[in-house]
């Protein structure tokens, strides 16, 4: 598909308008993405900071309340002890009272006897009705507003029996007759009992007030200084309930809230504070979020009291409700066993991000609409402006195509027609003298017009000149062919003479080379003869040395033979001595046999000597055999060496004769060398003369060949010129000129 200049200009103009809009859209999209990410991070940071602050505030409120409870309870305990001391203290009486208590092992009820006790002059009364006043518990309660219980020690281990109390049970009767054991069912020692028995004050948390109730105990000593009981007090303050209501009123974000989960006693894994109190007391371990709750409690306790932890999770405020993404910050308040947390639902904050990103979406829409409007305007303007540029160029293309096809006459006529309907062409013709004031299309028109006129003149001149060149080229080619035949004949004669000279020079060179080889062979023969003579002398000397060595070896072998005879004599002597020793040992054995027991040891020695004598005889015989073999070998060696010495003397004589013959050969070779040298010099001079003749004829032949080649090139050049002129005429004939 052909893309016109007008389309290209329009396309480029549209691209110039669209690209900035697209770039702005890309930048805006990137900014929107970054803004959304930044907004999410900032919102998350604000959520974390806000929720963390709420959790810290609630934690501080709990801590302040606990400190207040501790202070108040401590003051009440001090007041109770003061009242008891001012009343005369605790006294254990001689009279006793019956109590029905459960057996620790079996759980069956049994009766025990305990001594009565009194506070000062007032015997401690066992009264269950709250309407009857009991001293000192009611006095302490009326004075401080606290709940007070007096315990009596019932055994050495420290088990304490509640004998008087202002606290009421479920039947609105005084809560007495129960035992606080020194050791729990799990085998652990009760810390309160242990401290009290040791004479120390102690405290513990009970399940009242959602696990926040603080009960303080102090030991009660009798007249003998023995810990016979204890007093326990706690404040039924409304502070915890007020704190709980304040927490319920605390809001976090739009739908967030503060929650509290218990971790001890009957409140373990249960809601203490839930959203609006709707699920307070609910056992979360039985819900579908059991594992999540256990994870929250475990994380908070492991982090430590007052340390903040955070978690994002799916949660719903009802088991049958939809799950929502929630973010909570929580901590552990150890004194009450509370996990305090505040959380928000993250979808409450997505509206902020959507508002900010919505503005960016509007900006993107505005950019798209404005870009489309600008594109429409630019399309109209570019279509008009591209016509002003592309139309003259299209006409110029048509004229150039006519020129390319050779129709110069039609091109000239078309140029004249362009001036009639093209304003730029008319303006260019009017300002032809001052072309700086003409735009590019006008300059293109003037250039094509001048090109057509110049081509019309040039082609006409080329057609006329081509005829003249063709005639001259034909005449030159005929003369060159005649001269080429003459030079070819001369070159043939020169080549024959040169070939003959080359044969003479080659034969002389081969003969000279042969004489050189003969001369070198003679010199080599003389050298080899001299070397053979020297080698022969060396061989004669070596054979003389070998003869001397042979004689020396023969003498040494004779000496060895003599030594072997001496050794045989010595071995014979050893054999005789061994035989004599054997005979003596035999006589000694006979005498030992005669001696009986006293000769047994001597007989053993004699037997051993006889055995050694036998071994010596055997060894001597073996040595004698070896000496005999050695003498035979030495005799054989002496004979062989005599034979070898004779051969060596004979070879030395032959070597002397061969040396004399080599001297004669060397004299003959020495006389032959000067004669071979003279023949060689003559043949070398003859070869050099023939070579000079051959070189001269070769140069003459090369000159003739070069002349012939030049004529050939000239002839070819004339033919090519003729062909070129013919081709030029054929090409020029396509052009139609005026």
Image (cartoon, grey):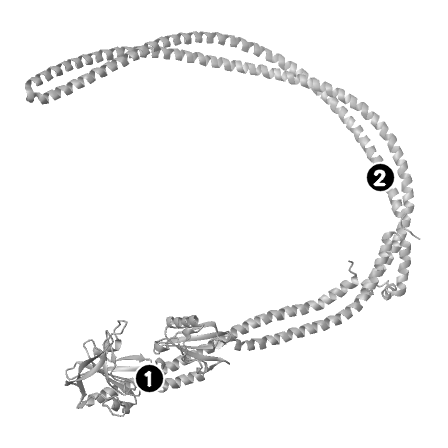
Instruction: Reply above or below: 716 against 216.
Output: above
Distance between the alpha carbons at the discs numbered 1 and 2: 128 Å
- In the image, residue 91 above or below residue 733: below
Labelled pair 1, 2 in contact (Cβ < 8 Å): no
> Residue 52 at what x, y percent from top left?
44, 77
Q: Which mark is residue 397?
A: none
Image quarter for residue 176?
bottom left
Residue at the right extreme of this rendering: 738
Q: Residue 268: x, y in percent?
A: 37, 75
Q: Which residue lies at the image location 61% right of the left edge and 76% below the top edge?
A: 359
Towards the viewer: 338 or 137: 137
Task: Give the residue pinned by disc 1.
Answer: 69
381 or 98: nearer the viewer = 98
Label number found at residue 720: 2
- Name the residue rendered at 45%, 13% in the picture: 539
In this rendered view, identify the residue nearer to me: 682 or 148: 148
Q: Residues within 10 Å of mark 2 (few under 14, many from 20)?
A: few
Judged left or right of residue 434, residue 530 is: left
Whether residue 347 is visible? yes
Mark 1 or 2, closer to the camera? 1
Question: Mark 2 falls on what kind of element?
Answer: helix
Residue 14 spot, x, y in % from top left: 73, 67
Viewer-closest of 319 and 261: 319
Closer to the N terminus: mark 1 or mark 2? 1
What secondary structure is found at the residue carrying circle 1? Answer: helix
Q: Is residue 67 above or below residue 13?
A: below
Q: Mark 1, residues whose alpha carbon is within 10 Å: few (<14), some, or many (≥20)?
A: many
Q: Quadrant of the N terminus?
A: bottom right
Query: Is residue 308 in view from this perspective?
Result: no
- In the rendered structure, the answer to whether residue 706 lies left or right of residue 132 reads right
């Amino acid at each position: 598909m052909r893309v016109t200049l007008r389309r290209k200009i329009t396309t480029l103009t549209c691209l110039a308008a669209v690209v900035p809009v697209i770039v702005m859209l890309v930048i805006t999209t990137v900014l929107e993405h970054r803004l959304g990410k930044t907004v999410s991070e900032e919102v998350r940071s604000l959520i974390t900071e806000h929720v963390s602050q709420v959790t810290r505030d609630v934690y501080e409120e709990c801590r302040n309340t606990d400190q207040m409870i501790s202070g108040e309870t401590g003051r009440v305990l001090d007041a109770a002890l003061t009242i008891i001391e001012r009343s005369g203290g605790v006294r254990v009486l001689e009279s006793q009272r019956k109590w029905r208590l459960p057996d620790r092992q079996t759980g069956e009820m049994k009766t025990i006897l305990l001594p009565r006790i009194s506070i000062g002059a007032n015997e401690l009364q066992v009264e269950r009705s709250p309407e009857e006043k009991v001293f000192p518990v009611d006095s302490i309660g009326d004075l401080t507003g606290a709940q007070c219980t007096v315990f009596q020690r019932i055994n050495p281990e420290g088990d304490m029996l509640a004998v008087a109390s202002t606290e009421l049970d479920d039947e609105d009767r005084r809560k007495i007759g129960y035992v606080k054991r020194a050791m729990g069912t799990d085998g652990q020692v009760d810390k309160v009992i242990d401290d009290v028995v040791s004479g120390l004050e102690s405290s513990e948390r009970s399940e009242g007030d959602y696990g926040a109730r603080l009960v303080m105990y102090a030991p009660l000593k009798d007249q003998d200084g023995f810990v016979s009981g204890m007093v326990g007090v706690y404040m039924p303050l409304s502070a915890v309930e007020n704190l709980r209501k304040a927490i319920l009123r605390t809001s976090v974000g739009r739908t967030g809230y503060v929650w509290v989960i218990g971790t001890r006693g009957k409140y373990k894994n249960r809601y203490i504070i839930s959203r609006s109190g709707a699920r307070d007391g609910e056992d979360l371990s039985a819900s579908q979020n059991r594992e999540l709750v256990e994870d929250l409690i475990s994380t908070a306790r492991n982090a430590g009291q007052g340390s903040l932890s955070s978690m994002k999770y799916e949660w719903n405020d009802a088991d049958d409700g939809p799950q929502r993404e929630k973010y909570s910050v929580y901590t552990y308040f150890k004194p009450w066993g509370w996990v305090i947390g505040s959380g928000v639902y993250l979808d409450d904050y997505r509206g902020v991000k959507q508002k900010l990103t919505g503005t960016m979406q509007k900006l993107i829409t505005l950019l798209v609409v404005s870009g489309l409007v600008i594109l429409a305007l630019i399309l109209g303007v570019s279509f008009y402006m591209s016509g002003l540029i592309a139309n003259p160029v299209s006409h110029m293309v048509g004229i150039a195509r006519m020129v390319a096809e050779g129709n110069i006459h039609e091109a000239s006529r078309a140029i004249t027609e362009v001036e009639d309907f093209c304003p730029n062409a008319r303006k260019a013709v009017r300002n032809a003298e001052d072309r700086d004031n003409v735009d590019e299309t006008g300059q293109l028109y003037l250039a094509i017009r001048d090109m057509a006129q110049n081509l019309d003149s040039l082609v006409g001149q080329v057609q006329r000149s081509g005829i003249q060149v063709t005639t001259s080229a034909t005449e030159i080619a005929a003369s060159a062919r005649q001269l080429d035949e003459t030079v070819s004949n001369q070159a043939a004669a020169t080549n024959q003479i040169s070939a003959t000279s080359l044969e003479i020079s080659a034969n002389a060179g081969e003969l000279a080379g042969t004489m050189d080889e003969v001369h070198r062979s003679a010199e080599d023969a003389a050298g080899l003869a001299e070397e053979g003579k020297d080698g022969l002398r060396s061989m004669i000397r070596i054979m003389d040395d070998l003869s001397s060595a042979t004689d020396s070896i023969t003498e040494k072998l004779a000496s060895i033979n003599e030594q072997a005879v001496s050794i045989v004599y010595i071995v014979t002597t050893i054999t005789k001595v061994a035989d004599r020793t054997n005979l003596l040992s035999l006589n000694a054995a006979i005498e030992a046999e005669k001696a009986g027991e006293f000769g047994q040891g001597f007989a053993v020695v004699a037997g051993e000597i006889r055995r050694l004598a036998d071994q010596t005889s055997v060894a001597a015989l073996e040595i004698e055999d070896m000496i005999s073999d050695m003498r035979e070998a030495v005799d054989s060696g002496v004979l062989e060496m005599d034979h070898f010495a004779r051969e060596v003397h004979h070879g030395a004589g032959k070597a002397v004769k061969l040396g004399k013959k080599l001297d004669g050969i060397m004299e003959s070779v020495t006389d032959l060398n000067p004669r071979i040298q003279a023949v060689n010099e003559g043949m070398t001079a003859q070869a050099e003369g023939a070579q000079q003749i051959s070189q001269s004829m070769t140069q003459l032949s090369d000159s003739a060949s070069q002349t012939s080649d030049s004529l050939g090139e000239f002839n070819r050049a004339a033919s090519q010129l003729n062909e070129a002129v013919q081709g030029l005429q054929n090409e020029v004939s396509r052009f139609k000129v005026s």
